[in-house]
Each structure stands twice: as structure tokens, then as C-alpha cells.
Amino acid sequence: MNARTSADLEAVLTSLEAPVRLVFFTQTFGCDSCLSARRIVDRIASLSDHVTVEEFNLVLDTDQAAAYGVQRAPAIAVVGETDVGIRFYGAPEGHELVSLVDAIALVSSADSGLSDDSRARIAAVDQPIHIQVFATPT
Amino acid sequence: MALESAYITASAIAAVEYPDLVHQYRVTGVPKTVVNDRTEILGAEPEASFVAHVLESIA
């Protein structure tokens, strides 16, 4: 899926068929982008009956932060039927917004869309792999 | 990939907001992917190549 325009993103969100929780971590001080991140997740949730937002404070809700393995804010855990470990750090704007909406659709469908060959190779993984992708909005 | 394996987790990081991480992982261009703090993938790659590179981190 290559959602691009705002209309595309809305179409993706309105066609979700299974619930996704956006577990949002904010902090009160020293987080310039937390407010814009909050606006974005709220906007996404407003476009789909299947998307809900849960907000926690990184500093105060330490149990939740530990449970989701989040050490920075703003952070968004994209959680479907299970938590497969997908996180977004920073306000998701531009390309990052597209990536977030794509991630929501993937988690909702529980279908990675990967090739059979990729799936077979990944199924053989027997130790932790943490992938960090650095990106910019433009 | 995170969907396909309970062992795999994935984070997308807005580089401009985390200069400390950009410095730590020597991010000079985006997209840059860092796997297990070790394997680095510069730029976007086709799926098969990306998967192969990610799995190199545990080879």
C-alpha cells in the first residue's frame, strides 16, 4: 500500500476492519512536538471508528512506559490484536504520517503484505531484532 | 517484519526531533536504518534486499 495524499490516508483509515489502539506517550515539560503529535493522533482517530487513542505521561505513568518499552516522548505504539512492537517517535508529519497510517493499516489487517520468500526467512528468526528507521518529514 | 515475528520490533524515529540519537547512530542522511545497533542500511531498498540486510544483523 502506498498511501500518499490526504484523501488517500483518509480512505485507508475509513476502510479499516479491525481495531487499532494508538498508545500515545507525552510529557508535560521539554517536549515541543508533543502537542502536534497529540493533534495528529486525535485526527487519525476521528477518521476511523476502529482507531482509539490512549494517552499516558512518560514521566508519571512509568509502568505503562516500561510495558511498552518507551523511553522518549512523543511516542506512539501501534497496537492491534497484539502488540507486535511497532513504535513511532516524534510528531508524525509528512512522510512519517504516511508511514504511520500504513502501519495502522498493516496492524489492523495483521497482514504484513510481504512476499512468501520474505515471510519464510523471517519465520526462521530465533533471536531479538530491533529495527530503527530514521526519517524526516520531507 | 515486526508483524511476521515476535522477535522483531520496529521503531520509526523523526530524526529532527532526536539529535542525540542522530549523533549516536551517525545519521547523515535519511532514510537510515539501524538494526540491533549494528547493521546499517542507507536509503530505501527493495523488500528482498532489505529483509536480507536486516537478517544479517543476527547472522
Image (tube, coloured by chain):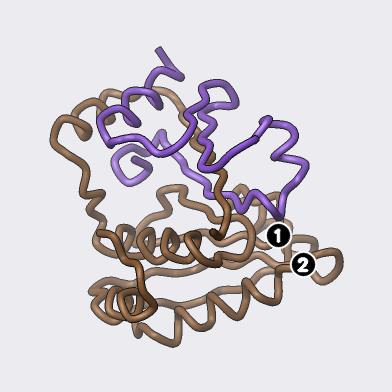
Chain colours: A brown, B purple
Estimate the x, y position of residue A24 in percent, counting from the top left: 59, 67
Q: Nearer the viewer, residue A137 or B55?
A: A137
| In the rendered image, the vertical position of residue A106 relative to residue A41, given as above or below | above
| In the rendered image, the vertical position of residue B28 relative to residue A124, given as above or below | below
Q: Residue at x 73, y 57 (%)?
A: A62
Q: Amino acid at mark 2?
A: Gln
Dot 2: what SS?
A: loop
Dot 1: what SS?
A: loop
- Tell me the chain of label 1: A
Look at mark 1 in the image and give the residue it sits on. Answer: A73
Q: Alpha-carbon neighbours of circle 1 within 10 Å: few (<14), some, or many (≥20)?
A: many
Q: So how many labels did they put on this image?
A: 2
Q: Residue at x 64, y 49 (%)?
A: B15
Q: Amino acid at mark 1?
A: Ala
Estimate the x, y position of residue B55 in percent, counting from the top left: 37, 22
Q: Nearer the viewer, residue B41 or A26?
A: B41
Most extreme residue toward the left is A116
Q: Alpha-carbon neighbours of circle 2 within 10 Å: few (<14), some, or many (≥20)?
A: many
> Does the residue at mark 2 contact the one at mark 1 (Cβ under 8 Å)?
yes
Look at mark 2 in the image and give the residue it sits on. Answer: A27
Answer left or right for A73 relative to A1: right
Q: Which quarter of the rendering shows the N terminus of chain A?
A: bottom left
Estimate the x, y position of residue A125 in percent, counting from the top left: 33, 25
